[in-house]
Image (cartoon, rainbow, N blue to C red):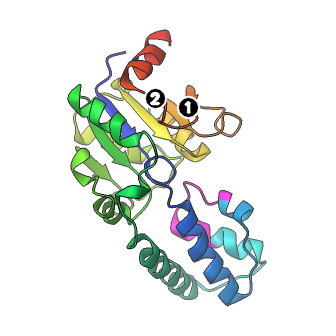
Amino acid sequence: MDLRLAIFDLDGVIVDTAKYHYLAWKRLGDEIGIEFTKQDNERLKGVSRMRSLDILLEIGKQERRDEEKEQLAAKKNAWYVEYIDQMDSSEILPGVLPFLDELRTASVKVALGSASKNARRILERVELGDYFDTIVDGHVVSKAKPDPEVFALSASLLNIAPENAVVFEDAQAGIEAARRAGMIAIGVGNPQVLDEAHYVISDFTAFSLDRLLELLASS
């Protein structure tokens, strides 16, 4: 494989914003009388904001009109933004920055492919925006993962064929999206959860470009 592009999901891969999503959804759940646990929060990984709200309402066996749902989702997002505005570069996950440096030195293009509508804001807070050749986020795409749109568009914007791209993802939906886009899917996290990935790494602390090229050469 001729590696020309590495695409990264944001939450759980570059930074861990899941904790802030959890705090905001729990706060909303408390307000509307729904108990929301950390285990419940796992169901929201890689899922759009409105679908996440639907899941929360399903947990609480509640139904709301569309107008109410829009208001609830906006309230949750406002709380989430409060939390992420306190972020700084210390919240970049271990090993990510050296790996991004290696990719840039090797002239491998780097893209962000995330459902988050706050992706650019987060990258700005942690001072990583300049590392990405293109950013495809929730403002650009209309179809949530596992639809491959976010990854397909990332490659298209950089004029790179899917077979020359790898995707780093921590969610099942993202792994499926990467595979459907015709790309190599590398899971970041638990191998049992990410069993559809071509390869799985625990994190980036012991990972390098040489190791990535070894994996790709063995496929």
Provide residue 184's location: percent of width, then percent of height.
Answer: 46, 27
Q: Judge the density around disc 1: few (<14), some (14-19), many (≥20) Cα neighbours within 10 Å.
A: some
Residue topped by disc 2: 207
Relative to 112, residue 54 above or below: below
Q: Residue at x 29, y 52 (%)?
A: 128
Q: Residue at x 55, y 68 (%)?
A: 21
Relative to 9, residue 77 above or below: below
Is 129 displayed left or right of 64 in the figure? Answer: left
The quadrant holding residue 35 is: bottom right
Is 161 displayed left or right of 146 in the figure? Answer: left
Relative to 209, residue 30 above or below: below
Provide residue 34's location: percent of width, then percent of height.
Answer: 74, 81
* Residue segment shown in magenta: 42-53
Residue occupying the far top of the picture:
218
The quadrant holding residue 1 is: top left
Helix, strand or loop at disc 2?
A: loop
* Residue type (three-letter) at the residue carrying disc 1: Ile
Residue topped by disc 1: 201
